[in-house]
Amino acid sequence: MTTADERTHSQASFALRELLRALRGGLLGLWRALLRTIDKPLAVAARAAKTVTPLGWIVVCAAVVSFLLAFVLGWAEFAFIGFALAGGMLAACAYLFGRATYKVAIELNPRRVTAGDRAMGRMEVVNTGQRPVLPTRMELPVGEGLAEFVVPRLAPNADDESLFAIPTERRALIVAGPAISVRGDQLGLLRRTTRWTDQVELFVHPKLTRIAATARGLVKDLEGQTTKAITDSDLAFHALRSYEPGDDIRNVHWRSSARTGQLMVRQYQETRRSQLLLLMSADRRFYASDDEFELAVSALASIAVEVIAEESELDVVWENARLRERTPMTLLDDTCRIQQVDSRYETLREFARTVGARLAEPSLVIAVVGSNVTHRELHGLSTLYPSDTPVIFVRAAAEGAGLRKVGDAFVATITKLPELAGLLQRAGR
């Protein structure tokens, strides 16, 4: 092939590539334009499909099947059924039209209660539009339940108020809302909802009991607790020893040095400020019943509130979180979120070692557990801490209240919350 032929072939190949590139670009542009054209209808169709309830879809499918059978078999009865079902869906569409001009507010009074106390809620609906609004059904989720209210016809600027009671028999974090207005037919074929409010939280705190202030570790200790460790600088005097090079000259006891004829320095017992580590394992395998678990949470909250009130240092942890201990109220709010879990820790000792790894070294450990915890689990946790760090187990159970020792640790078994104070006081002696 000559040079001219090669040049011609190269130009033809280049032209073909450019043609293919232009064709591909044109097809992509056409596809994007088509998507932009049908995007809005598709969005409208998706919103329309959401208004059809499961019962409505059954009616639509039954109508389609009836028309197909009527066409294939030629039976007029199926055609009649199809038209009747389609007419019902068309009639239901009329209930979806209309626009509500509401302003909705949800109030809970009070926002924080103790389990068993009464809590009330109020929902106020105001028509802020210039035209009357037809009657509407309002749905308000409250916890695991659903409250339904019928809002009557409201003139412009008119309002309607509905009151409802909130069950607070057990500790929980109850979420009320959002308030949703519902438009639809009486048969429940179509349903259009509008959200009007956000969620509102109600904290149902656990029941508490007062802990005796003389229980060990639950009092404010300004100077700290002495330990068996000996140091050259602290508050609790221990003994005198001979001076060694490098000792601080400020620790020299001059009167004893003059009497013995050699330099004597002071020794001290190391002291440290009280630091309570309050643990609770929410592993469901440790608890025999829900009531036992709630008793354990109440014991945890009672101890923590007393320590916070005494302004002692405190860390409160369970499997999923560390509780805020700035004020009793924030701590009680966090206890509402504690629930039984399938723990990722194989043993109680592993749980305590993992969650306590980033916390301050405790001077007292209190672990709250259930009745299904074995003595082996308790002993394993107690050996995790030094011998001068007391360990107390608070064990919630259905029976067998009392105090006993497992190794060097005390096990206070409670069957009722008021028993907690006396058993802790005995353990602290």
Image (cartoon, rainbow, N blue to C red):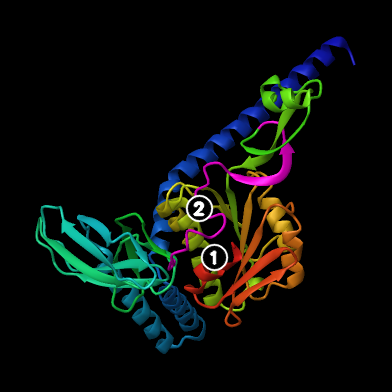
The residue nearer to you, when weighing 327 against 271, is 271
Q: Which quadrant of the figure contains the N terminus?
A: top right
- Upstream in the sequence, badge 1 or badge 2? 2
Quick one: 265 or 138, which is closer to the camera? 265
Amino acid type for the residue under numbered disc 2: Val
Residue at the (47%, 58%) spot, across then down: 213
Residue 425's disc number: 1
The secondary structure that most of the magenta stretch takes on is: loop
Q: Is residue 340 at all visible to an observer of this figure?
A: no
Report the side of 333 relative to 120 (left or right).
right
Instruction: Tell me the residue that label 2 is attached to.
Output: 219
Q: Is residue 131 left or right of residue 166?
A: left
Using the image as rendered, state which of residue 264 and residue 51 is in the foreground: 264
> Is 379 displayed left or right of 75 in the figure?
right
Quarter occupied by the C terminus: bottom right
Q: Is residue 235 above or below residue 294?
A: above
Q: Residue at x 32, y 59 (%)?
A: 111
Q: Of the numbered discs in the image, which one, if any, rests on residue 71? A: none
Please say whether residue 227 is one of the residues in the magenta stretch. Answer: yes
Give residue 339's quadrant in the image. Answer: bottom right
- Label 2 crowd (10 A; few <14 / some 14-19 / many >=20): some
Horizontal and vertical percent for residue 47?
Answer: 40, 57
- SS class, disc 2: loop
In screen coordinates, is 35 left or right of 390? left
Residue 203 position in % (x across, y down): 39, 61
Q: Residue 32 placed where, x, y %?
A: 52, 39
Q: Position of residue 344 (x, y in %)?
A: 70, 60
User: Magenta residues?
Assistant: 206-233
Badge 1 crowding class, 10 Å Cα cut-off, few under 14, some 14 to 19, many 20 or more, is some
